[in-house]
Amino acid sequence: AERALRRIDRLGWLPPGVTLEELRSSWDLDFLSLGRMSLIDVAAAIMMDSGVVEQFSIQPAKLSNFLHAVSSRYRANAFHNFNHACHACHGCYLLMREQIRRTAHDEQSARASTPRSASSCAIVELSPLDRLALLLAAVCHDVDHPGRNNAFLVSTGHPLAITYNDTAVLENHHCATTFAILADHQCDVLETLREAHVASVPALRERWRDISDSLRLGPRVQITEALAKRS
């Protein structure tokens, strides 16, 4: 645990062969070559570099504990595994950075008296809470996935389908599993959010479900559309 904590305690530590510039801009990172510890390093670096760790005063030790706990709850599925989760998290991070760049460009256009650009700026701007929800939901969106889809679970009367009354079974399960991990004080990366903005935690959970559902549907545009609706 100390080894992992030392790594993520300073921004910019990444596995061999992965640079900070690649983390911020490349869609071609070879995630399949990364082991579990390296994936945790990448996820931590994304959280640190995004600014949410600083904005929400997330303790590095709790971030480390949280990512280790999440990774341990992913099963050895061929696709819905921790590697896929970190890959999705990185993709969302790149989209988020593109949103930020686009917002900055549109703000400049708005100052140049271009009404259309001003409207576009309002659509793409993400709040800090949205950015936190996006990254956490991405890394947790398939946690404890059993390797079967909702249709299979419902048609076979799986215990999860019964628990969630055949409604968005996996999406509810992933969200509930994540918040069960967060209930452990040592893993509670939302601690300061709970203390300062109690009402923000239910709002975060609602955003979380929206994002997880968009990730399930697939097309990247649906992720940004779901976030835009929350702005």
Image: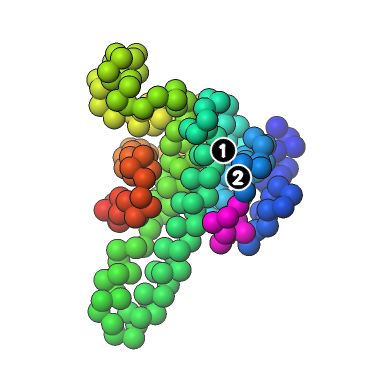
Is 192 displayed left or right of 3 in the figure?
left
Nearest the eye: 211 or 111? 211
Label 2 is placed on what type of residue? Phe
Mark 1 nearby-residue class (10 Å; few <14, some 14–19, many ≥20): many
- Name which quarter of the figure residue 105 lies in: bottom left
In this view of the protein, can residue 182 be seen by the observer?
no
Label 1 SS: helix
What is the number of the mark on residue 122?
Answer: none
Assign the N terminus to one quadrant of the image: top right
Q: Nearer the viewer, residue 182 or 76?
A: 76
**Amino acid found under the numbered disc labelled 1:** Asn
For mark 2, give the secondary structure.
helix
To which residue does mark 2 refer? 31
- Which tag, 2 or 1, sits closer to the chain's start? 2
Task: Name the residue carrying label 1.
Answer: 83
Q: Are marks 2 and 1 in contact (CB under 8 Å)?
A: yes
Q: Residue at x 55, y 49 (%)?
A: 47
Q: Is residue 102 magenta?
A: no
Residues shaded magenta:
22-29
Residue at image location 34% in from the left, 14% down from the top: 158
Residue drawn at the location 48% of the way across and 32% of the way down: 80
From the viewer's side, name the closer residue of 159 and 178: 159
Quadrant position of residue 11: bottom right
Rendering coords of residue 200 (x, y %): 36, 43
Picture coordinates of residue 68 (x, y %)?
60, 32
